Structures are given as C-alpha cells and as structure tokens.
Image (spheres, rainbow, N blue to C red):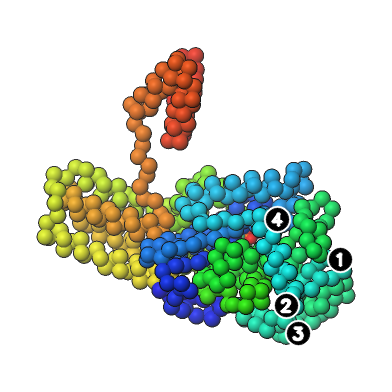
Amino acid sequence: MKIYNTLSKQKEEFIPVEEGKVKMYVCGPTVYNYIHIGNARPMIVFDTVRRYMEYKGYDVNYVSNFTDVDDKIIKKAMEEGVPSQEISRRYIAECKKDMEGMNVKPATTHPLATEEIDGMLQMIENLMEKGYAYKVEDGTVYFRTRKFPEYGKLSHKNLDDLESGHRDEAHAVKVQSADGKEDEFDFVLWKPKKEGEPYWESPWCQGRPGWHIECSVMARKYLGDQIDIHAGGEDLIFPHHENEIAQSEAANGKNFSKYWMHNGFLNIDNRKMSKSLGNFFTVREISERYDLQVLRFFMLSAHYRSPLNFSAELMEAAKSGLMRIITAAENLKHLKGITAVQEMTAEEEKLFAGSDVYVSKFEAAMEDDFNTADAVSAVFELVKYLNTHAASDKSAELLGKFHHRLTSLCDILGIIVEREEEILDSAIEALIQERKEARKAKNFARADEIRDELLQKGIILEDTREGVKWKRV
Ligand code: AMP
Ligand code: ZN
C-alpha cells in the first residue's frame, strides 16, 4: 500500500510502526458553529482511509480531537451571553449528528482540548526544562523555534528564506508588538487570559494553551510518542503541523509521525469558500436538499489530494451515480427473493469469478494512495457487470454473492446501499394498538417506549380526539 507522504513529497510504501496496527491522528474541527462542507472533506476521506485499513486487517486506533477552546468559540459565547463550554458542547453534538449522516465512524477516541490541560502543562514544562521554551514578562510561553534544527521539514520551508522574504513584515512585527519574543518564528505554547475568557492555572500565568500544543499532547496520550499517520487539510501543513512536529519531537526525542497526509481544499463554483463571498454551506444545509450519502459519494469521486469543486451539477451527478449503485443492489436482492433456483451451477461459479477483476481494480486503486476516484470507477464497472448477468433464472446463491460483493466494496467507501427496511403499515397499527392498551393499563413507560421506537423508524404519532394518527417523515 502506498501513501503520499507530505514529509518526503513522495508516495511511500506503508509500513506500520507496530505490525498489524495503525495509529492515526486526524485534526478535528474547532467547534463554534455547524461544520461546513470543507470540514467534511477530511472527515470523509480519512474515514475512508481507516475503513480500507480495517478491510486489510489492521487494527486501527483512530483519534480525532475537537478544538473546544479558541478565540472564535469565546467570541460566539460572548455574543450569545453563555459560557463558552455551552457553545462547544452544542456544536460537538451537532457535528456528531452530521458525521453520522455522512456515515463517518466515530473515532476510537474524540479527545477534547479542555480535558487535556494537565498533559499540556507537562509537555510545556518538559520543553522549558530542555530549553525549547521560554516565558516572557506577561506570562506567555513561546517555543524557541530555532533550537529545533529540523523546523520546516514538513512544509519544506527554510527559516532563513522565510525571514528574508518577510524582512519588512518581520521588522514591522518586532516594532509594533513588543511581545518579548526572541524570534519572529517562535510560537505560543501558553498565553495569559483576557478579561472574561476561560482559563486554567499554570506555573506561568492564568491562561490557556496555544492550539498546536493541544494536538501534540492528545496524539501522545492516546497513540504514543510515535504514530503512523497524522492527517488534516492542506492548510494545516504550515504552521500547525510543522509546529506539532517541533513540539513533539523536541519533547519526546523521537520522530513523531511516519506519514503525513493532507487533503486538498474544497471550493465552491471554483472559488474559495468563504462567508463574505456568500458561497458557504454547512453540512446541515446540504442535508436539507440531499441525503448526506450523496455528499460523501461526491467527495470520494475525486482524489483526496486534488482541489475539489462543489457545484449543484456535480452533486446531481453524484446523486445519479449513487442511485445507479443502489438500484443494482436492490435489483439483486429482489431477484434473489423471487428465483426458484437455490444453488450455484459450475457455469455460475465462472460468472462469479468474472467479477474478481473489479475487486482487484478497486484494491489497486486504493493501494495507490487511496485513489477513491478510480475505486469508484471500479464499482461502476462492477455494477455494469452485475446488471448484465443478474436475472431471475440465476441461483439465489450467485445473486447473494453478487450482492455481497457490491455492498462490501461500498462499505469500504462508507457508502450505504441498503435502505433501512421500511416498517409496514400493519406493524405500525399493531404497535399503536399495543400503546393504547399500555396506556389504559397505566404502563406509560411502555407507551413512551413505543412512541420512541416508532419515531426512530421515522413515524410520528399524534394523539387527536378521533384517536391516534400517524405519519411518515
Ligand atoms: P478548522 O475547524 O478550521 O480547524 O478545520 C478542521 C479541518 O477542516 C482541518 O483539517 C482543515 O484543514 C479542514 N478544512 C477547512 N476548510 C476546508 C476546505 N475548504 N476544504 C477542505 N478541508 C478544509
Ligand atoms: Zn491539530
């Protein structure tokens, strides 16, 4: 399996730190609002990487944080006049709903920055002891970037070049800010609180951590000093991931992550997505118009490292492509239900073996740096093959194996082809009758349970004077 490593700018063979295991950290969103469709891209692509690793038999420990202390969260909390924790908790819950809609598996651990402050204090102290960090007058602690000779190895930047390129700016920064930094590239590990902001006690001042130290600490706590894959959007390469490397490697004395993966950006109508341009969509908004499976399928139709343009036409194309796959799966299931033949014939064995080539194509695409665009093409080729050979005179065994082959490839992509079985009207009526009897017997717990059970299946009950009415949502 080959992975493009931002560190070497090459595709490299994947060799895990520990045999059979994958330790993976994906930088998660800052939770001050509903996530937008740009945030959804790393969630979907790296969930697909995880699924493929699991398909290959790896035991994957997948960690993805929520950044729950940040200027934007504090600002929103002040606007609403509520504690910032209320904002972060609210949008973590909403984010999890969106993830579920996109069929993104919950991480093995979703750590919260605010629950890991002790680890951050420890790592900062360790960096200070080793001379990699220093405190200035107001209590801010900075990382001494020039002490880490490999700084710039991920973003392929050289501090001296950066400095000469920014000489004027750098000069301006020094004159204006007078923040006590020894060097313009030093970055914040800990900063003092401002009025009304959340804060924690520390040996340096009452304050809060810098963003970069959060990820270094959470990755170490849940995955160890050395991890296999660290991932996020390409905007995180510099400075976020570069700074994470400097902190972790200076503190732990070991190479931090073997492979660094970065997804390309999602644009809208070929322009950068931004609130001010008015071309900004949340996942929630998209879910009002499309099943979020369509969004997932759309994202996977491109290579994760390419920029991806979001448009109504491309979403419509994704929708009809997805329908083609779903229809093929449903047709196979239907035929299996009506065929009179049970066992596979020798001829059918050959027919089934004829579909092996599409699985091989799918795997080859995924092995080549997770080329989901080609993997999706292989699924379409398989669909064409299945549609050609599926018929009601084929055996149930063959039709079942065809169906399983299609659904298992889709499962690696996180695409659900099978709709939930619809609950029949007669079953609903029976449950409503049971609820009526439960209420008569004053068994309100059971009555509520039935209402909830139906709600989960998309059935809403309404108690009216004429009796109970129900509708599907
Ligand atoms: P943030 O909440 O800004 O820290 O972003 C969370 C994740 O979403 C990071 O991995 C970002 O790189 C990624 N991200 C943000 N905007 C986009 C975008 N337009 N396209 C792709 N990824 C993005
Ligand atoms: Zn991070």
Q: CA distance from mark 1 to mark 3?
A: 29 Å
> Is 212 located above or below residue 79 in the figure?
below
x and y percentages locating residue 83 in the rendered image: 74, 45
Q: CA distance from mark 2 to mark 1?
A: 21 Å
> Is 373 located above or below residue 465 in the figure?
below
Name the N-terminal-most of marks 2 and 1: 2
Name the N-terminal-most of marks 3 and 2: 2
User: What's the residue type where badge 3 is placed?
Assistant: Ser
Crowding around mark 3 (Cα neighbors within 10 Å: few <14, some 14 to 19, many 20+) is few
Q: Which secondary structure, mark 4?
A: loop
Front position among marks 2 and 1: 2
Residue at image mark 2: 130
User: What's the residue type where badge 2 is placed?
Assistant: Lys
Name the residue rendered at 82%, 78% in the picture. Answer: 182
x and y percentages locating residue 276 in the rendered image: 69, 56
Crowding around mark 2 (Cα neighbors within 10 Å: few <14, some 14 to 19, many 20+) is few
> Taking the image as drawn, is residue 169 in sight?
no
Residue at image mark 3: 164
> Taking the image as drawn, is residue 160 in sight?
yes
Front position among marks 4 and 2: 2
Name the N-terminal-most of marks 1 and 4: 4
Residue at image mark 4: 69
Crowding around mark 4 (Cα neighbors within 10 Å: few <14, some 14 to 19, many 20+) is many
Front position among marks 1 and 4: 1
Residue at image mark 1: 138
